[in-house]
Amino acid sequence: FVHRSLNWVFSMTEIKAIGVVGGGQMGSGIAQLAATHGHQVWLIDSDPAALAKATDSISSSIQRLVSRNLLSREIGAIALQRLKFSTDLKELHSADVIIEAIVESEDVKRKLFVELDKIAKRSSILASNTSSIPITRLASATTRPEQVIGMHFMNPPPIMKLVEIVRGADTSDETFDAIKILAERLGKTVICSQDYSGFIVNRILMPMINEAFFTLYTGVATKEDIDTGMKLGTNHPMGPLELADFIGLDVCLSIMKVLHSGLGDNKYAPCPLLVQYADAGRLGRKRGIGVYDYR
Ligand code: NAD
């Protein structure tokens, strides 16, 4: 017990600087959350336009939280000073924890983990915000699989209370403890999942969203009735199609493909309508059009 407690104290004092890779909707929210909780943060994206958008969305999100009295004006202002933006991964050489939040593709993520393993200091923990890809496969791209872990935030990270932590086959207890403490210090409740495609939340949520697409595709009901049915009938705050637009249809489709191939059951086959919308670039709110038109 004493050994574990010491580890915890050690972890708490160690994690100061945080790196986030991928400045889209999740990465920018995670960077904001870490900065408002006292961390120095580098946010890296390969696309300068994404960084410009992240800068705007973080400052307007902080303003909204301040105006709703969910964040003090002073902490909001300090957080903005603690955040740095770059396209250069090398800025992450001294980060204690690096959280990856790039596109949901195993190949692209594995390439990034190879790079991060070279750049990050030996003690740093490499975490992935993947929604569905087994952590063991990302960890095996590095020379430090015991320091690789899933840290799955929900959307939007500054607001949603959950972090799902996923242990890869080789993730050490020290890495798990450090990330659990970090998540709790960021104000989150932690759940722990074994390393199987989709983990807990998306294993259950995505088949529901996919089934909502099948319900629309087969003409059972209109999109409005499907969403109203699930909102009022099951007390969900958002209908499944509205939620799919919020998450991003490309992200939903990638997760269904990971469930389908990883769990090997045809019940996870993506609905053809979801595939068609994603092919058409109807990716949801972030593109102004998905199942619904926001333009
Ligand atoms: P997004 O498309 O909004 O953002 C992805 C960002 O990553 C883009 O800005 C892109 O330029 C950048 N990027 C891509 N490849 C890169 C690379 N090699 N190096 C640096 N930057 C790179 O996606 P998102 O919705 O923020 O999702 C990001 C991750 O978070 C995915 O793994 C997704 O599954 C996961 N996730 C998403 C949600 C959600 O609701 N959208 C929720 C939880 C987890």
Image (cartoon, rainbow, N blue to C red):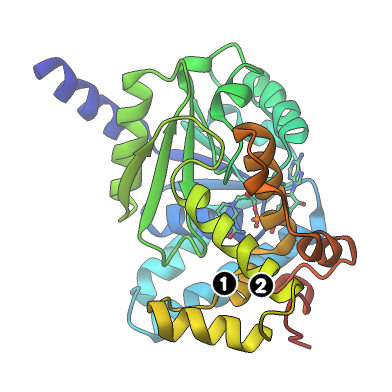
Secondary-structure class at tag 1: helix
Q: Residue at x 76, y 72 (%)?
A: 217
Identify the image quadrant of the C terminus.
Answer: bottom right
| Residue 240 quadrant | bottom right
In the foreground, 225 or 247: 225
Residue at 18 percent of width and 21 percent of height: 4
**Label 1 belongs to which residue?**
240
Question: Which class describes the residues within 10 Å of circle 2: few (<14), some (14-19), or many (20+)?
Answer: some
Judging depth in this view, the residue of 241 and 263 nearest the camera is 263
Q: Is residue 189 visible?
A: yes
The tag on residue 215 is 2
Instruction: State whether residue 122 appears in this view.
Output: no
On the rendered image, what quadrant is the N terminus found in? top left
Residue at horizontal 61 percent and vertical 77 percent from the top: 242
Q: Amino acid at mark 1?
A: Pro
> Which residue occupies 36% across, 71% down?
74
What is the spatial separation of the Cα atoms under label 2 and label 1, in whole angstroms? 11 Å
Q: Is residue 53 left or right of residue 280?
A: left
Judged by depth in the image, the label closer to the viewer, 2 or 1, is 2
